[in-house]
Image (spheres, grey):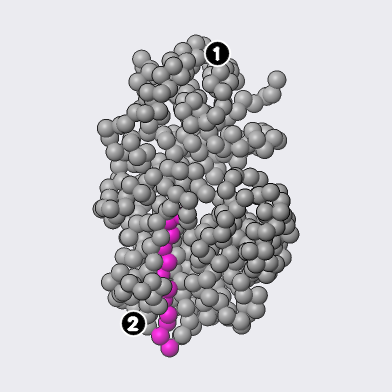
Amino acid sequence: MSKHNLRADAAEVIMAVIDKGQSMGQALPQAQRHYIDGRDKGLLAEICYGVMRTLPQLDTQLRRQLEKPLNGKKRIIHCVLLAGLYQLKHTRVASHAVISETVEACRKLGAPGMTGLVNGVLRHMHRNLEQLQAEQFDADAVQHAHPGWLLKRLQAAYPQQWQQIVTANNQQPPLWLRSNHKRQSRSEYLVTLADAGIDAIAGDSDDAFRLLKPMDVTTLPGFAQGAVSVQDLSAQRSSQLLDCQPGDAVLDVCAAPGGKTCHMLERQPLIGSMLAIDLYPERLKRVQQNLDRIGLTAELKDGDARYPAQWAPGQQFDRILLDAPCSATGVIRRNPDSKWLRRDSDIEQLALVQAEILEAIWATLKPGGTLLYATCSVLPEENAGQIKAFLQKTDDAMLSPIQPQESAEQPGWQLLPQTDGGDGFYYARLIKRA
């Protein structure tokens, strides 16, 4: 018998996020180390991410079945039941396997006395599954599986579109990839995929395509040699919008994990120099791994973007990509735990940090140079509001419109998450007056 029970490990990951404030990126890989089979790793991830997407609904329905809340040392059993209920409602795993494995998880977690409760609750919910699936919830925060503070912000900013946004947020993300411009055209790579029996369609960005069925991307033709990389459709637009030219000195700020760094180098092999910085040295290892796989070269430095004199003293750049730290409210479908880890008060603090970074990095841009400000947020305070304020106080900053309707009052291009399209993203392009 295996030392580990997948449902027990899922419960521990879920509790680490919702009770201990760990991110899924911290907790899940620790649990996945126990498994060699990719299918087991995939199921573990699906359960954990799925619970985070639908947490308020699962929690509401589960609590109705319990005479007493499962608190204290029994809290882990509550998380086991969340994992079990998610599988019954949202996966194709056979119900008898879900129930028996979830009951076994109690034993693995040292709570054999809870097996009867878990068995009874899950069997009852399975009998009433059709009703549970169809239930409509009174509270918006439960019905839409978003915290109340975030719903209010989305409703205020997008009175006509907020439901579209939360619907996209609650979906599994589409699998977008980027064809390496240096190796082959996208159309050529799509032919290669078709020959391999892999279904994919082109996106409306030059190098982007989407796989119609999820798969292990490392098995794609040429992946190990850098022919293709994982990158969302919206994120891929940054390289086109910055449009690096031969000989340019380029700075990529907050660069990890390096997808945009690599894309710029793929599209313009004659870049004069590329400096990629990130606050965390550990994250720069991912950037180097991506560069190595594709066969690209860039200078990597760790440093605080607010203090460029510490990591690029006296340097000036022709083009800068500033992928500012943000609330990540445009990529919730990729990081559904962020709905429960982020707080309303975080937005003001993030906006302050963004403003500091933007002002500091602007000083490193050459006259006549271009800065592309980007976030994976949909909140105006971090996006159009940020750039509007910067333009008002910065005499040598000029908006370079991406979309025809842009103005100094409403600057930038706000992309909202699309169910089969790209993530939520914001871009604003600025030029420094000579």
Residue 353: image location, x then y, percent: 40, 62
Give neighbour class at mark 1: few <14, some 14-19, many 20+ (Cα, 10 Å).
Answer: few
| Residue placed most toward the observer, 313 or 427 | 427
Secondary structure category for the residue under label 2: loop
- The extreme bottom residue here reads 434
Residue 330: image location, x then y, percent: 42, 53
The residue at which mark 2 appears reads as 395
Residue type pointed to by label 1: Pro
Q: Quadrant of the N terminus?
A: top right
Q: Is residue 370 above or below residue 351?
A: below
| Residue placed most toward the observer, 200 or 35 | 200
Q: Is residue 96 above or below residue 389?
A: above
Question: Is residue 32 located in the magenta-colored stretch of the structure?
Answer: no
Q: Residue at x 67, y 34 (%)?
A: 35
Secondary structure category for the residue under label 1: helix
| Magenta span: chief secondary structure | strand
Q: N-terminal of the two: label 1 or label 2?
A: 1
Please state if 122 lies on the left or on the right of 161 as rendered. right
Q: Residue at x 69, y 24 (%)?
A: 2
What is the spatial separation of the Cα atoms under label 1 and label 2, in whole angstroms? 69 Å
Question: Is residue 428 located in the magenta-colored stretch of the structure?
Answer: yes
